């Protein structure tokens, strides 16, 4: 990942994604609010953009059209220094199922291509709201019945995130998921939701890779980003 010149204050961070991004179940078993709480130790944290069931691929819960609509009234557009993206878990679950009925007969190579295509669109949109680095968390899904789909989706996502086209502005966060990272319920581990320990591990990985620059969140008028000098700073969000 690229390094930037350092400055005073904390860098701002915004988290995007599915139920793991917003937090699932209240503590102590769950992670609701944990990303926001834990990230404040290292970043100036913006409100999370996410909800349950969101996917990269086309579905009734596709992330990009939902997020675009969610933030359509955000004026001026609030840019963050860095973004953290948590997606892919539900794609692994829903592929070849009713929610993604279109995928029933689609070959794996085509699914991989579609994952990369739609993720590229997501990353391009978030790049328009991120001054620095986008951290992409390795998708979690420990369902044994979905091992093949997990391998397919994770491979496609990793290849896209690691593309040289992003010039180091998108960072893959490999997590080597295990049973120790899962929320544990009375009936056993939840294979699709990581625990508070994992939230700490994700943020530690992002901090280890983040550029040294720290400038805080900054709103800019729509269309102001771009040009040789980039967006003008209007104000620094205080928390």
Image (cartoon, helix red, strand yellow):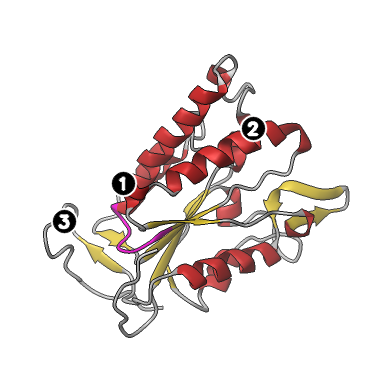
Q: Nearer the viewer, residue 137 or 19?
A: 137
Check the image and report above or below for 237 versus 61.
below
In the image as oriented, which residue stretches furthest toward the right? 187
Which residue does the numbered mark 3 point to in the structure image? Answer: 226
Check the image and report above or below for 81 versus 137.
below
Quarter-of-image position of residue 8: bottom left
In the image as oriented, which residue stretches furthest toward the top? 105
Q: Secondary structure at mark 3?
A: loop
Counting residues from the start of the chain, the first of labels 2 and 3 encountered is 2
Q: Secondary structure at mark 1?
A: loop
The numbered dot on residue 72 is 1
Does 131 lie within the magenta span? yes
Q: Are marks 2 and 3 in contact (CB under 8 Å)?
A: no
| Inter-mark Cα distance, 1 to 3 | 19 Å
Q: Quadrant of the C terminus?
A: bottom left
Q: Position of residue 24 (x, y in %)?
A: 65, 54
In the image as oriented, which residue stretches furthest toward the front? 164
Say which residue appears at 64% left-offset and 32% top-offset. 149
Neighbour tally class for label 2: few under 14, some 14-19, many 20 plus, Cα within 10 Å = many
Q: Position of residue 62 (x, y in %)?
A: 48, 35
In the image as oriented, which residue stretches furthest toward the bottom? 8
Q: Secondary structure at mark 2?
A: helix
| Range of magenta residues | 128-134
Which residue does the numbered mark 2 point to in the structure image? Answer: 149
């Amino acid at each position: 990942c690229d390094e930037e010149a350092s400055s005073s204050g904390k860098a701002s961070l915004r988290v995007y994604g599915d139920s793991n991004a917003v937090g699932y179940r209240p503590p102590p078993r769950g992670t609701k609010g944990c990303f926001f709480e834990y990230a404040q130790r290292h970043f100036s944290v913006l409100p999370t953009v996410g909800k349950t069931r969101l996917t990269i691929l086309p579905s009734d819960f596709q992330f990009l059209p939902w997020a675009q609509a969610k933030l359509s009234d955000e004026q001026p557009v609030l840019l963050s220094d860095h973004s953290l993206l948590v997606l892919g878990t539900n794609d692994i679950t829903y592929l070849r199922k009713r929610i993604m009925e279109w995928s029933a007969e689609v070959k794996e190579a085509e699914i991989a291509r579609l994952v990369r295509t739609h993720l590229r669109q997501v990353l391009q949109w978030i790049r328009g709201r991120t001054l620095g680095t986008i951290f992409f968390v390795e998708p979690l899904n420990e369902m044994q019945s979905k091992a093949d789909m997990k391998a397919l989706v994770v491979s496609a996502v990793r290849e896209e995130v690691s593309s040289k086209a992003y010039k180091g502005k998108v960072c893959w966060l490999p997590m080597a998921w295990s049973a120790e990272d899962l929320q544990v319920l009375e009936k056993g581990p939840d294979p699709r939701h990581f625990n508070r320990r994992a939230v700490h591990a994700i943020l530690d990985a992002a901090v280890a890779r983040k550029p040294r620059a720290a400038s805080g969140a900054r709103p800019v008028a729509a269309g102001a980003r771009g040009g040789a000098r980039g967006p003008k700073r209007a104000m620094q969000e205080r928390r």
